[in-house]
Amino acid sequence: MSAVANRAKGGMPSWATWTGRIMSGIVVAFLLIDGVIKVLDLAIVGETLNQLGYPASLARGLGFLTLQIAVLYAFPRTAFLGAVLLTGLLGGAMATHLRVGSPLFTHLLFGLYIGVLAWAGLLLRDARLRAVTWGAG
């Protein structure tokens, strides 16, 4: 098969599109787990929020917000909006960890890792976003 025949819609090789879907799937799985444990209001979530300087009563609201962002990011039609909202959520988490002096690579930069994974996954799976950012369709 030729290289052209192996390309997925949007001019990317099919392996790149699938890599993007897998990367995005990892982000969605993380968001779903994070959202569910907050909605269930597990004791560890309340303790962690208190250590970060937030009241434990915020857990459920943050959980529902996280789940909504996960759903938006998961569906192609709303994935860009989900990625933008996720970036804001992660930025707030990073600012919180910076404020309380959390360890750099394991806590503070974790939001960066997830954000890069989310945007890279979206770029690989969305031809429209690639066209806007790279000028390629």
Image (cartoon, rainbow, N blue to C red):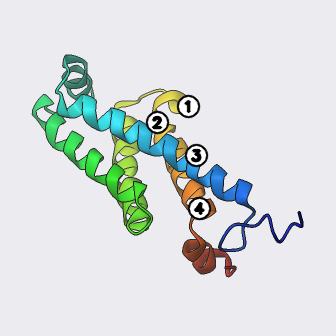
Residue 93 bears which disc, if any?
none
Mark 2, secondary structure of its residue: helix
Q: Residue at x 48, y 26 (%)?
A: 103
Q: Quadrant of the C terminus?
A: bottom right
Q: Residue at x 67, y 76 (%)?
A: 134
Q: Residue 14 sits in which quadrant?
A: bottom right
Q: Which residue is mark 2?
A: 108
Q: CA distance from mark 1 to mark 2?
A: 6 Å
Q: CA distance from mark 4 to mark 2?
A: 27 Å
Q: Position of residue 11 (x, y in %)?
A: 72, 73
Tell me which numbered mark, 1 or 4, is placed earlier along the sequence. Answer: 1
Q: Which residue is mark 3?
A: 22
Q: Quadrant of the N terminus?
A: bottom right
Q: CA distance from mark 1 to mark 4?
A: 28 Å
Residue type (three-letter) at the residue carrying disc 4: Arg
Residue type (three-letter) at the residue carrying disc 3: Ile
Q: Residue at x 54, y 60 (%)?
A: 122
Q: Which residue is mark 1?
A: 105
In the image, farthest residue toward the left: 57
Q: Are marks 4 and 2 in contact (CB under 8 Å)?
A: no
Mark closer to the observer (4, 2): 4
Mark 1, secondary structure of its residue: helix
Q: Position of residue 46 (x, y in %)?
A: 19, 24
Q: CA distance from mark 3 to mark 4?
A: 9 Å
Tell me which numbered mark, 4 or 2, is placed earlier along the sequence. Answer: 2
Residue type (three-letter) at the residue carrying disc 1: Phe
Residue type (three-letter) at the residue carrying disc 2: Leu
Q: Which residue is mark 4?
A: 125
